Image (cartoon, grey):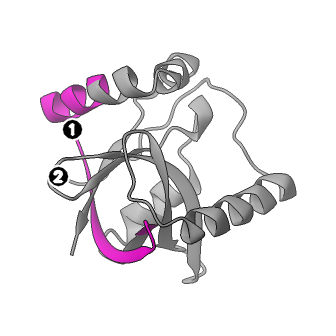
């Protein structure tokens, strides 16, 4: 199924600005240097291709292992009414993303989960990382859950 681009009418303030850009670069650098494998609620570097610029856009995101070698990520934007830019970039080019974790760079394909499959994964995510439940309460949009599968 395709990406749905849900938008809300209320939510937290969208994270942005020079401090966020600096922090994302710093976090991405630390993640790339780390040699351990990603675990439940760990962070990885997701690199998407900008839908307008065509440039690589690395961003650290919380990840959850799927058990089959793939990862789940949530486009929460801290509970903002709009989706984060990386979600829109993935929707535009779902087969042109990479994941960096545990010293490994992996090409991935992105798929948005829907229906019961999304609900089941969402329950697991909020059990592992309760902060995501709070993000969901801040907004009226359904937070997209994305599976990143190795290509």
Quarter placement of the C terminus: bottom left
Looking at the image, which residue is at 15% across and 34% down?
117
Q: Is residue 137 above or below residue 120?
A: above
Residue 13 location (% of width, % of height): 72, 33
Q: Tag 2's secondary structure? A: loop
The image quadrant of residue 150 is bottom left
Q: Is residue 130 left or right of residue 40?
A: right
Of 13 and 108, nearer the camera is: 108
Q: Is residue 98 left or right of residue 10?
A: left
Is residue 16 within the magenta segment? Answer: no
Q: Which residues are magenta?
A: 100-123
Residue 136 location (% of width, % of height): 48, 23
Per the image, the residue denoted by label 1 is 114
Q: CA distance from mark 1 to mark 2?
A: 8 Å
Q: Determine whether label 1 and label 2 are within 8 Å by CB.
A: yes
Is residue 114 within the magenta segment? Answer: yes
Which residue is farthest right? 18
Per the image, the residue denoted by label 2 is 1
Q: Tag 1's secondary structure? A: loop
Of 38 and 93, nearer the camera is: 38
Q: Is residue 1 left or right of residue 4?
A: left
Q: How many marks?
A: 2
Q: Is residue 56 above or below residue 141?
A: below
Q: Is residue 29 above or below residue 134?
A: below
Looking at the image, which residue is at 24% across and 54% down?
2
Looking at the image, which residue is at 57% across and 62% down?
31
Of 92 and 135, nearer the camera is: 135
Of 8 and 119, nearer the camera is: 119
């Amino acid at each position: 199924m395709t990406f749905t681009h849900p938008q809300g009418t209320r939510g937290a303030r969208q994270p942005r600005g020079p401090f966020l850009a600096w922090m994302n670069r710093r976090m991405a650098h630390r993640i790339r240097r780390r040699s351990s494998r990603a675990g439940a609620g760990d962070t990885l570097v997701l690199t998407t291709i900008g839908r307008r610029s065509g440039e690589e856009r690395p961003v650290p995101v919380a990840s959850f292992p799927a058990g089959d070698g793939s990862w789940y990520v949530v486009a929460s934007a801290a509970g903002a009414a709009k989706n984060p830019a990386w979600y829109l970039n993935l929707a535009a080019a779902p087969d042109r993303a990479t994941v960096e974790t545990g010293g490994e760079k992996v090409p991935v394909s992105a798929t948005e989960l829907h229906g019961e499959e999304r609900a089941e994964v969402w329950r697991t995510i909020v059990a592992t990382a309760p902060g995501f439940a709070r993000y969901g309460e801040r907004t009226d949009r359904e937070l997209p859950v994305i599976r990143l599968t190795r290509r």
